[in-house]
Image: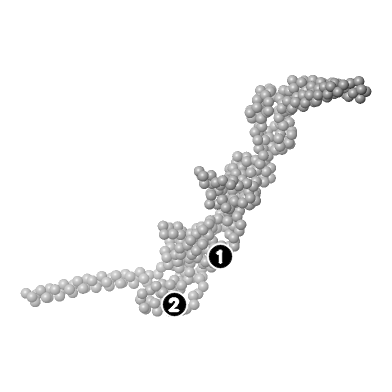
């Protein structure tokens, strides 16, 4: 009985050992197969990192207004007698635009001028009599007072008459008439608008964090879209108070408008040009990948460097010796046609500012590194790659770029 039990136990151990051995052999064979299976390199486009001159820009949205612009109205009530302008006329300062019915005021002014002339004659006679000694001082004083009163009355009536005329307060472009001849108008009724379109201004706001970047006289570019900014100007005013509700700081810039295409009330893109900075490391935006663990790029390096790095972290002595031997050999320069010699290494980076399709890299890579700009979705850390820059998405849309 005991002998049978021993034989059965031995057979069970042999069967279990065979099964375990077979599984280990199978796993080792599969591992060796995949380890020795050639990996097809992935085509990627790259960008060589070099220090550049970085010109930071402050982007904002603004509203255009005329440097001088008003809605004109009359000073007094009356009936419109003449409209002396047409829409979009260029008018000069002091030019008469609208004349109200002023017949009564003209008659009053003529009567006052006649009285002023009569009082002047009375004064002259009083002065002559005073010189001959037959006139009194009281008579002379009364004559002089009457003449001064008449002069004041003439000036007053002249001012009343001038109020019947609407004149241009400055030179500019006149708008559409909003009145008709024969219409009764009163102060407050808008007659038309007058805008000086030669020089414009733009009001815009920036975040409070960028408030120190605003300085009087700093150059500003303007345009109807961010790709074309043909208008230039300079900051002329900065609001010293930050809006506590929006946390925005307001600024005003003056714009030259030589072609007259900018109109008051128009929306514009604003770009404040900041001082240039030298030796800045920046890469195309397409090279940076954002993940939950941080921002990273793929750096293309020769496979020998990858093997040397893996050997330094290895655990098997044989692999360490082989990797050390490989690392001792001088690394050959990377070649675009050597599809088996390049690998893509994942490198985490610290990013900074963005401008003109590029991202500033504060930490992580250095000048001379070659980063992947397209094809990252097929890469893993250590993937074999080959460079194909026939199509570079980082240059798409830039002047002079061509896509094949």
Residue at image x 57%, y 52%? Answer: 212
> Answer yes or no: do the residues labelled 2 and 1 have beta carbons within 8 Å?
no
Q: Which residue is mark 1?
A: 50
Quadrant housing residue 262: top right
Query: Dot 1 lies on which element?
Result: loop
Residue at image x 74%, y 20%? Answer: 104
Q: Residue 7, which numbered label?
A: none
Q: Position of residue 273 (x, y in %)?
A: 61, 53
Q: What is the spatial separation of the Cα atoms under label 2 and label 1, in whole angstroms? A: 29 Å
Query: Dot 2 lies on which element?
Result: helix
Left or right side of 161 for 344: left
Q: Position of residue 278 (x, y in %)?
A: 59, 62
As drawn, 120 above or below 33: above
On-image quarter of the N terminus: bottom left
As drawn, 298 above or below 169: below
Q: Nearer the viewer, residue 150 or 382?
A: 150
- Extreme residue toward the left, this view: 1
Q: Nearer the viewer, residue 309 or 58?
A: 58
Left or right side of 177 for 136: right
Q: Which residue is mark 2?
A: 326
As drawn, 14 above or below 159: below
The mark tally for this picture is 2
Q: Is residue 269 visible?
A: no
Q: Earlier in the sequence, mark 2 or mark 1?
A: 1
Q: Position of residue 5 (x, y in %)?
A: 10, 74
Residue at image x 8%, y 76%? Answer: 3
């Amino acid at each position: 009985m005991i002998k049978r039990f021993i034989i059965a136990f031995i057979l069970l151990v042999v069967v279990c050992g065979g099964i375990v051995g077979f599984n280990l052999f199978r796993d080792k064979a599969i591992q060796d197969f995949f380890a020795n299976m050639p990996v097809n390199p992935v085509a990627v486009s790259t960008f060589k990192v070099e220090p550049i001159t970085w010109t930071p820009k402050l982007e904002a949205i603004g509203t255009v207004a005329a440097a001088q612009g008003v809605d004109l109205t009359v000073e007094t009530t009356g009936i419109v007698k003449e409209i002396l302008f047409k829409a979009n006329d260029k008018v000069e300062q002091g030019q008469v635009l609208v004349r109200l019915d002023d017949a009564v005021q003209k008659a009053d002014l003529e009567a006052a001028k006649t009285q002023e002339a009569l009082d002047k004659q009375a004064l002259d006679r009083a002065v002559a009599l005073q010189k001959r000694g037959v006139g009194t001082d009281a008579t002379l004083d009364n004559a002089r007072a009457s003449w001064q009163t008449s002069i004041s009355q003439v000036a007053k009536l002249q001012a009343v008459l001038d109020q019947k005329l609407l004149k241009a307060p400055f030179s500019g472009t006149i708008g559409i008439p909003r009145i008709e001849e024969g219409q009764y108008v009163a102060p407050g009724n808008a007659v038309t608008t007058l805008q000086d379109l030669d020089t414009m201004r733009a009001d815009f706001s920036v975040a409070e964090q960028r408030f120190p970047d605003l300085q009087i006289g700093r150059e500003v570019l303007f345009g109807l879209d961010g790709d074309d900014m043909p208008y230039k100007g300079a900051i002329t005013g900065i609001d010293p108070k930050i809006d506590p509700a929006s946390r925005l700081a307001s600024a005003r810039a003056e714009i030259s408008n030589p072609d007259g295409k900018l109109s008051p009330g128009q929306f514009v893109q604003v770009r404040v040009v900041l001082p240039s900075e030298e030796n800045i490391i920046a890469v195309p935006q397409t090279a940076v990948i954002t993940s939950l663990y941080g921002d990273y790029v793929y750096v293309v390096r020769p496979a020998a460097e990858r093997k040397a790095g893996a050997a330094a972290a290895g655990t098997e002595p044989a692999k360490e010796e082989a990797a050390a031997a490989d690392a001792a050999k001088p690394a050959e320069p990377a070649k675009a046609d050597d599809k088996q010699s390049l690998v893509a290494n994942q490198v985490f980076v610290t990013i900074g500012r963005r401008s003109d399709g590029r991202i500033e890299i504060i930490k992580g890579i250095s000048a001379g590194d070659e980063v992947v700009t397209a094809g990252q979705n097929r890469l893993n850390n250590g993937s074999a790659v080959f460079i194909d820059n026939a199509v570079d998405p980082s240059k798409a849309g830039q002047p002079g770029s061509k896509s094949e």
